[in-house]
Image: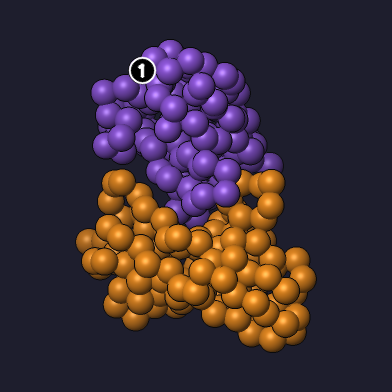
Chain colours: A purple, B orange
Amino acid sequence: EVQLVESGGGLVQPGGSLRLSCEVSGITFSRYWIHWVRQVPGKGPVWVSRINENGGITNYADFVKGRFTIYRDNAKSTLYLQMNSLRVDDTAIYFCALDLAGARDQWGQGTLVTVS
Amino acid sequence: IVMTQTPLSLPVTPGEPASISCKSSQSLLHANGDTWLAWYLQKPGQSPHLLIYMASNRASGVPDRFSGSHSGTDFTLKISKVEADDVGVYYCMQGLQTPYTFGQGTKLEI
């Protein structure tokens, strides 16, 4: 069974930093693109970032460019999101999602980030 | 790419069919022939889970009551006979190009 478990969320002041982690098991992690998607409770999901299988290609939503960095450690089957210069409107549940929109699409349960 | 989903609210009766529409602002057809449109269901307190990928392929474990189709930039998710467990918010999402974008969501209620 494929499992994705996010961690690292919490309460941070505006301008602060957090690093989110997403540990993946039950699948060959290094074979898949993997993404971060966020969702304000009661609102729709919003795509944040993605990274390719070996970490050589990354893409970001405009609203996080220059502030967030996505990276992965295939040896640890773990995805990361380094979030700097956090703003109040970054408050959301952050999900990692493997193979988004593909046949093996799978999401974690999310980790809550509160910037206040 | 803008995804426009309708309706936003869908009251249904168990056993009856239901249909949700999603329109993309441009083609979602990749050069390799795949159409990058996915449908998700998000139940309260849960993360979204995949129902349909590549516009018309049911994800593993998804009942055959769910089907996806499309014509050009118009996409449809159909539930042949709604069950009580189908309640939640349904989203379409395009995965052709970044930023991936979601429809506004359709809340299905019994």
Q: Quadrant of residue A25?
A: top right
With respect to residue B105, does A30 lie above or below? above
Expressed as whole percent of the image width and height from the top left, the position of residue B55 reads 43, 68
For mark 1, name the chain.
A
Q: Amino acid at mark 1?
A: Ser
Expressed as whole percent of the image width and height from the top left, the position of residue B16 reads 69, 86
With respect to residue A106, does A74 lie above or below? above
Which SS class for mark 1? loop
Q: Quadrant of residue B79?
A: bottom right
Residue B62 placement, left or right of B100: right
The answer to whether one can see residue B105 in this image is yes
| Residue at (40% x, 21% y) in the render | A86
Expressed as whole percent of the image width and height from the top left, the position of residue B108 reads 63, 69
With respect to residue A14, does A103 lie above or below? below
Nearest the eye: A14 or A95? A14
Q: Quadrant of residue A5?
A: top right
For label 1, the residue is: A85
Residue A26 placement, left or right of B20: right
Residue B32 placement, left or right of B22: left
Residue B29 placement, left or right of A42: left
